[in-house]
Amino acid sequence: MLWPNDEFTRFEVARLIGARSLQIALGAPVLTKTEKTSPIEIAKEEFKNQIIPITIKRTLPDETKTAVEAKSAIKNWVNAHAGEI
């Protein structure tokens, strides 16, 4: 079974938001206008606005490697899981 290149797993979403919040906590520039001060909340806001500058690369069970189309995958996640983030 191949995983779609335009969908994230819940684990990838958690890793993506966690990695971005760490970057923000270490001084990376914030890419969205927000009043929030918590790095995790800022990363979630960036995720909702589809502007997280990170690429997800997967190694599938058959050892093939693929990259996820982040912008469409985030859009699909936000549409499917509205209110969860």
Image (cartoon, rainbow, N blue to C red):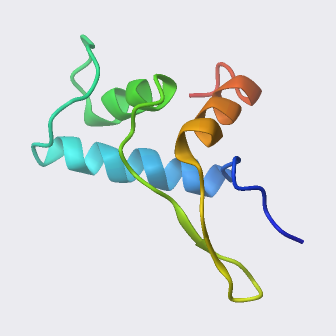
In the displayed image of the protein, which residue is found farthest to the right? 1
Image quarter (top left, top right, bottom left or bottom right) of the C terminus: top right
In the displayed image of the protein, which residue is found farthest to the left? 27
Say which residue appears at 83% left-offset and 68% top-offset. 2
Q: Is residue 31 above or below residue 35?
A: below
Residue 35 vs residue 61, the one in the foreground: 61
Q: Is residue 76 above or below residue 1?
A: above
Say which residue appears at 40% left-offset and 32% top-offset. 51
Image quarter (top left, top right, bottom left or bottom right) of the N terminus: bottom right
Question: What percent of the width, then of the height, locates residue 8?
Answer: 66, 50
Question: What percent of the width, then of the height, locates residue 41?
Answer: 36, 28
Q: Is residue 45 above or below residue 33?
A: below
Residue 71 vs residue 23, the one in the foreground: 71
Give the side of residue 44 with respect to residue 57, left or right: left
Say which residue appears at 39% left-offset and 39% top-offset. 52
Give the side of residue 5 with respect to residue 56, left or right: right
Question: What percent of the width, then of the height, locates residue 13?
Answer: 56, 47
Say which residue appears at 70% left-offset and 33% top-offset. 76
In the displayed image of the protein, which residue is found farthest to the top? 35
Give the side of residue 33 with respect to residue 19, left or right: left
Give the side of residue 20 with respect to residue 30, left or right: right
Number of disc labels: 0
**Which image quadrant is residue 12 in?**
bottom right
Question: What percent of the width, then of the height, locates residue 75?
Answer: 63, 30
